[in-house]
Amino acid sequence: MARGAGGKGVNSARASGASRGGGGSTERPLARMFLHPEAFRDGGAVLDGQAFHHAVRVLRMAAGDTLLLLDGSGRGWTARLERVMRSEATATLLHEVPEDASPGREVHLAIPLLKGDRTELVLQKCTELGVSEFHIYPAERSVVRMDGGGGKRERFVAVCRSAAEQCGAFRMPEVRLWDSARAFLEQVRTPGRLIAWEEESALSARDALGGGEPCTLATGPEGGLTREEVDVWAGYGFRPVSLGRRILRAETAPIALCALALCAL
């Protein structure tokens, strides 16, 4: 489970000295930023777009300040801002920081698009738990439809980035939107495959998630999964599992399922 900012390891990477203008000697946590891998080159990095806005406009960082830069694949460096310009900043990489508290297993999560901001809630909380990839697919009873998806994906990636920075993760989960459930199912490669279904009673998710192997977990929409849908998923190796006697909301089920997969290790 992700640890708070006061824990040991990378979550507590510190910058010594007070903030600019202060005279004390207190330490403060390093600001964390995910950059695209292409932003790193020749011992330095370029901050632009959202990373620049957050560092310079929100956190009021300036040349000489130190922060922690991550490439999303598990590598991170302490870095010093060198030049702050109108819409971008450059930084020098100082020291590589080893990844700590990585998830105990590889977990992919498939969910339908949910109403309102419920999809974002699932992405945020499951990023904190340590999900590696998110797959958003259309279900038969989905209340919300994809209707394109480019703008939605950009928003979802931003939610995952913010959650990963907040919880001390070194990796950014991938977010993919699918036009059909079958298109998603045809590319699943993990040995473990489970789908939570409210009509299943014989096999509990807790019992099925033992072993720690890479797995793909799936849940249904607000209206639930049809028996025909579950049969299709079963044809691709997904075992229906129960999350207990209570009927969980569409945004609660995936969080509970991922917590069982990741926090019991």
Image (cartoon, grey):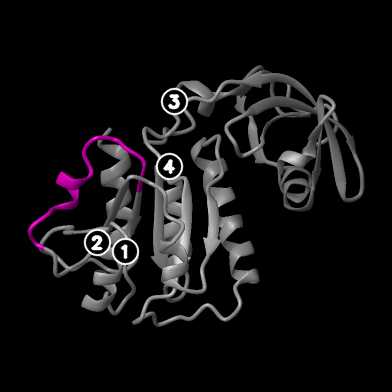
- In 3D space, how far apart are the residues under numbered discs 2 and 1 (Cα atoms)? 5 Å
Q: x%, y% of residue 4?
A: 44, 34
Image quadrant holding the N terminus, namely top left
**On residue 130, which mark appears?**
4
**On residue 219, which mark appears?**
1
Say which element carries label 2: strand
Q: Which amino acid, by three-letter code, is at mark 1? A: Thr
How many other residues sit within 10 Å of disc 1, few (<14), some (14-19) or many (≥20)?
many
Q: Mark 4, mark 1: which one is toward the viewer? A: 1
How many other residues sit within 10 Å of disc 2, few (<14), some (14-19) or many (≥20)?
many
Q: Is residue 28 magenta?
A: no
- In 3D space, how far apart are the residues under numbered discs 3 and 1 (Cα atoms)? 32 Å
- In 3D space, how far apart are the residues under numbered discs 2 and 3 (Cα atoms)? 33 Å
Q: Residue at x 65, y 70 (%)?
A: 151
Task: Determine whether 165 is above or below 125 in the image.
Answer: above
For residue 69, what is the image quadrant?
top right
Q: Are marks 2 and 4 in contact (CB under 8 Å)?
A: no
Residue 140 seen in the current view: yes
Q: Earlier in the sequence, mark 2 or mark 3?
A: 3
Say which element carries label 4: loop
Describe residue 113's horizontal placement relative to residue 91 as left or right: left
